[in-house]
């Protein structure tokens, strides 16, 4: 592997088509596509300022690096990425990628990030401004995670999330086979139109959660006072610790809680759901 260290590049495609490079303390200034069509790349203690530095790259490691706002859309159409201890200030990152692992990464402007990705692992990752995060992505494994941003995880499949705090309106819409364990979920309209959503020991807040779901399972979860009008037209099996403010027109299944403030069955659907208070 060729070592390039303590230097700077700029302009168009300065390292285009390179293979087997170790970049150490390198700055990529304004320009485009610095490492396009590359493979077997290691970048350590580097700064990326130009657009699109890693496109169509197969096999790369990024450690202790900085992607400034100018490095927008930096990692697209690539595979087999390991990123560690890195600050990503640029939006629209990680598109059309497969087999990517992020550890101890902070993304403070994560708008439109992680779209159409497959086989994603996140550990100790935090994101903000993350509207539409993870759109149409699959096979996701997350642990120790913090997120602020709406409309997240829409149309995702095969997801496991543990120990997360997610502040997101319209999260997990149209998802399939998603499991959340020991998570705090804040934001209205959680999980609408999902299939196989499984919540274990989760804490939920926000109006009208978990409506139009199929195969919804909740184990030992808690629901805040603002979780009103829950479970509309959902097939649900829910074991709720504490109270539910109101339940509206559940379709089928079984709901059990410590207390239920109001059950609304207005005839809009034929409900075959068993509802009970301990």
Image (cartoon, rainbow, N blue to C red):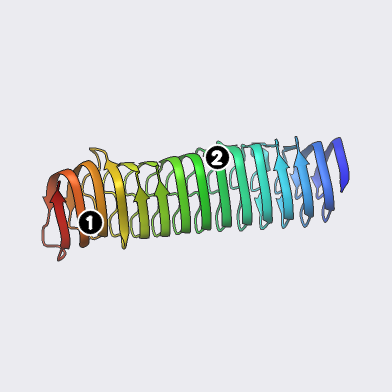
Tell me the SS state at disc 2: strand
For the point 76% across and 54% down, the residue is 36
Q: Which numbered marker is on residue 232?
A: 1
Q: Between residues 84 and 52, which one lies in front from this camera angle? A: 84
Residue name at image x 82 percent, y 53 percent: 16
Callout 2: few (<14), some (14-19), or many (20+) C-alpha neighbours within 10 Å?
many
> Picture coordinates of residue 53 (x, y %)?
73, 47
Q: Is residue 138 left or right of residue 266?
A: right
Choose the circle earlier in sequence order: 2 or 1.
2
Number of dots carrying numbers = 2
Q: Residues within 10 Å of mark 1 (few under 14, many from 20)?
A: many
- Residue 157: x and y in percent read 46, 60
Residue that protrudes farthest toward the right in the picture: 2
Identify the element where label 1 is drawn: loop
The answer, for residue 180, to whether it is visible in the render is yes
**Disc 2/disc 1 C-alpha distance (Å):** 33 Å
Does 166 sit left or right of 77 as displayed?
left
Residue 90 versus residue 230 in the image, above or below: above
Q: Is residue 94 left or right of residue 61?
A: left
Residue 240 coordinates in the image, percent (x, y): 24, 46
Q: Are marks 2 and 1 in contact (CB under 8 Å)?
A: no
Residue under label 2, please give it: 125
* Foreground: disc 2 or disc 1: 2
Report the front residue among 72 and 6.
Answer: 6
Residue sitting farthest toward the front: 278
């Amino acid at each position: 592997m060729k070592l390039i260290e303590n230097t700077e590049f700029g302009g168009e495609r300065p390292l285009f088509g390179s293979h087997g490079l170790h970049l150490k303390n390198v700055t990529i200034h304004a320009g485009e596509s610095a490492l396009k069509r590359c493979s077997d790349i290691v970048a350590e203690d580097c700064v990326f300022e130009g657009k699109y530095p890693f496109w169509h790259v197969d096999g790369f490691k990024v450690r202790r690096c900085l992607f400034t706002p100018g490095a927008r859309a930096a990692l697209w159409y690539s595979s087999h990425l390991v990123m560690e201890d890195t600050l990503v200030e640029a939006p629209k990152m990680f598109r059309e990628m497969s087999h990517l692992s992020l550890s101890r990464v902070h993304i403070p402007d994560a708008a439109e990030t992680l779209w159409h990705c497959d086989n994603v692992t996140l550990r100790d990752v935090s994101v903000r401004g993350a509207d539409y995060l993870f759109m149409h992505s699959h096979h996701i494994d997350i642990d120790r995670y913090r997120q602020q941003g709406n409309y997240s995880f829409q149309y995702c499949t095969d997801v496991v999330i543990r120990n997360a705090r997610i502040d997101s309106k319209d999260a997990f819409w149209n998802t399939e086979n998603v499991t959340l364990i020991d998570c705090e979920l804040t934001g209205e309209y959680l999980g609408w139109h999902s299939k196989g959503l499984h919540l274990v020991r989760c804490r939920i807040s926000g109006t009208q959660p978990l409506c139009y779901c199929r195969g919804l399972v909740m184990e030992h979860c808690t629901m805040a006072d603002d979780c009103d009008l829950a479970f509309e037209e959902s097939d649900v099996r829910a074991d709720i610790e504490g109270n539910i403010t109101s339940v509206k027109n559940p379709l089928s299944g079984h709901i059990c809680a410590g207390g239920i403030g109001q059950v609304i069955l207005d005839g809009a659907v034929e409900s075959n759901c068993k509802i009970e208070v301990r």
